[in-house]
Structure formats: structure tokens, C-alpha cells
Amino acid sequence: MRTKIVAGNWKMNKTFLEAEELVAQVAEALDTRKLDNKTVVLCPPFPYLELATDIAKDAKFSVGAQNVYPDDSGAFTGEVSPPMLKSMEVEYCIIGHSERRKYFAESNEFLAGKLDGLLKHDIIPIFCCGEVLPEREAKKHFKVVEKQLNESLFHLKKNEMSRVVVAYEPVWAIGTGVNATPEQAQEMHAFIRSLIAKKYSKKLADDVTILYGGSCNAKNAKELFSNPDVDGGLIGGASLKAVDFLAIVDAL
Ligand code: 13P
């Protein structure tokens, strides 16, 4: 069955005390909610993962990292490996975020290695894809996303692909206040699902969770999530305030 997910990507925000406060607020508010088939994931910066996983033990959310290095260990100063995340009970990891692609030149091929590393250690990858504005304006957005999936994801075996969460994040919508319209999101999500069906099977494609990300907020979440192929959201700015994030959780 397809899991519905709201994941908060905090990016590089919050001091330790602020992080402690936000995790506690979310934990407390979720305590009184019935989440059924919904999963809530918090993805704080690396230094706060332990704080989050500690609280998550008795709370209704899971913890994700925002990045990972493909290898298990070695001389890679400043990097964090899949077994390290696993040993801290981190269950999810965002990869391929457009900010990593842009500022750290992460290629589709490099991301394929990260997927392998995460899956080997039983961590669920949240794989981000999406086009930049000139690509959409040139009507190349489907081609761009197809290439990202082909080069990073589609080497996976069926039993690996079935554990991946995909997040469609049109780059022009990230942090701009201009979200994709529900129609644009649905159209791309259905396209992504059709590619997965063609490569693997319809059954597998039907079960893959595909999140929308990009200026998703308390006001537009319900309409975005009401589409049949939009299974939740990957939330940036609006995940930094408990009330806003929880309103998005409630909209799913
Ligand atoms: P915003 O919600 O701030 O647009 O960011 C989306 C995002 O990049 C989530 O990964």
C-alpha cells in the first residue's frame, strides 16, 4: 500500500535550542492526533539527529537526514555515511535535492551511488527530482525529470525501487512562494508513476510514494494533496514553525 508522507526539510536552519523546541512542539501536537496511514518525517541538520531520534522513540514521527555520502567509511572529511545514520536510528534520507545539485555539483551518477549506499543499510531514500524554470519554459520538464530518474534510480532492482520515496520539487517553486499548480503537480506525478510502471510494473508504481515539494504551505497543501498521484509533501520553509507544519500534516 502507498504510504502518505509529510516530511519537513529544515535545511540549514535552527540552533540546538531552537531545534529542541521545534521537535518537542511537533511531538506533543502529534501525540493527540490519529495518523492512520500517514507518516511524519523530520529532517533536521546532522548535529540534531540524535536529539530527534531520542524524542522519536516515544513519538509519532520518524527521522530523516538531509544528505549522505555513498561509501560506508573512509577518508572523506566532513562527510556522513549510511551506516552512521543507521546506527543513529535514522530511517529516511533526502538525496538529490536541487540545492545539493546546484551548490555542490552533485550529478545523477553520484546520486545513484548514494541510493545504493542507503538501500544497502535499509534507509529509505527520499529522491528529489525537478526542473529549473528555463527548462519548464522550453517545455523540457518531462525530459529533464525522465533523465534524472533514468540515471539515478532505474538501475535499482525491483525490491530496491519499491523502498524509494520520490519527491517532485520543481526548482522554480522552491522557496519562491510560487507553488506548482495542483494540475502541474498531478501531471508530473502521474508521468513519474508511468515511467516507474514502464520500467518495473504497474503494481510497484502504484505503491511508490511521490511527494510534492516547493512552496507548499498550510494554505495550498489540501488542494495539492487532493490529487490522486500526490501522496504528501516535502516541506521546506513551512516546516520551521510547528503550527504551519502541523496544518500541512492535517491537510493530508
Ligand atoms: P520550500 O517549501 O521552502 O519551498 O522548500 C521546499 C524544499 O526544498 C523541500 O525540500
Image: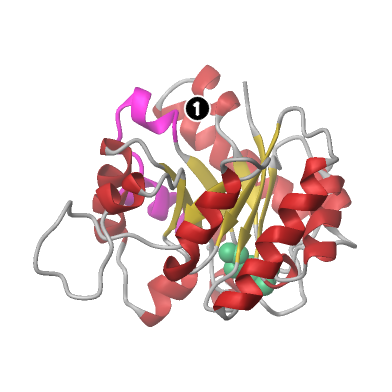
Residue 30: quadrant of the picture: top right
Say which residue label 1 marks.
197
- The x, y position of residue 101, in whole percent, is 39, 71
- Quadrant for ligand 1 reads bottom right
Residue at the (58%, 79%) spot, across then down: 13
Q: Amino acid at mark 1?
A: Ala
Q: Compare residues 222 and 243 and report the one nearer the observer.
A: 243
Q: Residue at x 57, y 25 (%)?
A: 207
**Horizontally, is 206 left or right of 243 in the view?**
left
Name the quarter where the N terminus is drawn: top right
Pinpoint residue 26: horizontal percent, then vertical percent: 74, 56
Q: Is the C terminus in the top left, top right, bottom left or bottom right quadrant?
A: top right
Q: Is 150 rendered above or below residue 44?
A: above
Q: Residue at x 17, y 54 (%)?
A: 71
Q: Is residue 146 magenta-colored?
A: yes
Q: Position of residue 72 (x, y in %)?
A: 17, 51
- Total of numbered circles in the picture? 1
Magenta region, residue range: 143-163
